Amino acid sequence: MSFSFEYVDSIIDRTTDCIEKNGDFNINDKLYVGVDLGTAYIVLVVLDSKGNPIATELQYAEVVRDGLVVDYSRACSIVRELKGKLENRLGVELVNAAIAMPPGVNNKSVATHRYVAESAGFEVLNVIEEPEAANYILNIDNGAVVDVGGGTTGIAIFNNGKMIYTADEPTGGTHFTLTIAGNYGISFNEAENKKKDKNNSKEIFRIVLPVIQKVGSIISKHIKDYNVDLICLVGGTVCLDGFENVVEKETNVHTIKPKNPFLVTPLGIAMSLVENNKN
Ligand SMILES: Nc1ncnc2c1ncn2[C@@H]1O[C@H](COP(=O)(O)OP(=O)(O)OP(=O)(O)O)[C@@H](O)[C@H]1O
Ligand SMILES: [Mg+2]
């Protein structure tokens, strides 16, 4: 099966460029913000009403664990700070926001995420599930979208463009980092840096192979009752070279990932608002 990442790769590149430099926008246009409260990163992405990336801010923060906000006041202050940075950069107030949750979290957790965004001054217009958000960018009609973030692996299965199943499991990048830390006898932070350094990719791959295989077996378990013949991986953790090949071998399902899988979900959160507000 062929699938083109041309659009995905280009809009992700533009969103990444927007970390450094604003995109052009009309001051009277409606702007939409995707707020992604992740286990590893808090990311805010601003899109114009046509879905063009305008500005991106992100910060590494450990305020969420397995989809739950564990440091409420710090989460609020970081979101407020990032919102302020974006508003300073753009010279406009940002109000319209969407948030996303790992599939299956309870209503209380959803409410807490919402309060975090609202406390920063956002109006939350949409709440969606993380892999569902990713598919606003990937546009996969038939297949599974799997978001391997810092804390969890979220899975959504699509059939004829409709989301028919979602699940979330507590395995993510943190487990990869812990495995590396244990292997070398180094700190979590050192292991995190080692993991992301492309110069170590062969050695790291060997060490984390069992964890990638575990992600593969998690995916297999969730797709087994569905007719899935394509898996698309997103999330920071699948940046690891060769991740998709291991998942393909483990699941026996054709597995692909975009050139840069990192910002797909936060971008998709913002894109959900653009799509919902199209006339
Ligand atoms: N180049 C890289 N190679 C390997 N891992 C990476 C790379 N870049 C980021 N990561 C890992 O990706 C994870 C963060 O990904 P992401 O931002 O998608 O997660 P999150 O949204 O914060 O977490 P979650 O969705 O689980 O709440 C971290 O564990 C980080 O170490
Ligand atoms: Mg995430």
Image (cartoon, grey):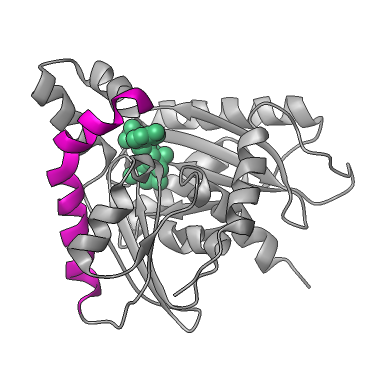
Q: Which quarter of the rendered image does ligand 1 occupy?
A: top left
Q: Quadrant of the N terminus?
A: bottom left
Position of 139 with respect to 10 (left or right) is left
Residue 223 magenta-highlighted: yes
Q: Is residue 218 visible?
A: no
Q: Quadrant of the C terminus?
A: bottom right
> Which quadrant holds residue 17?
top right
Q: Is residue 230 above or below residue 273?
A: below
Q: Is residue 223 visible?
A: yes
Magenta stretch in the rendered image:
198-224
Return the x and y of residue 29 as percentages of the image width and height: 85, 50
Return the x and y of residue 177 as percentages of the image width and height: 22, 30
> Which quadrant holds residue 70?
top left
Residue 102 magenta-highlighted: no
Residue at image position (69%, 60%) is 274
Return the x and y of residue 139 as percentages of the image width and height: 55, 68
Would you say the magenta stretch is mainly helix, strand or loop? helix
Q: Is residue 246 above or below residue 85?
A: below
Residue at image position (77%, 56%) is 49
Residue at image position (73%, 28%) is 21
Q: Nearer the viewer, residue 172 or 201?
A: 201
Q: Is residue 123 above or below residue 75?
A: below
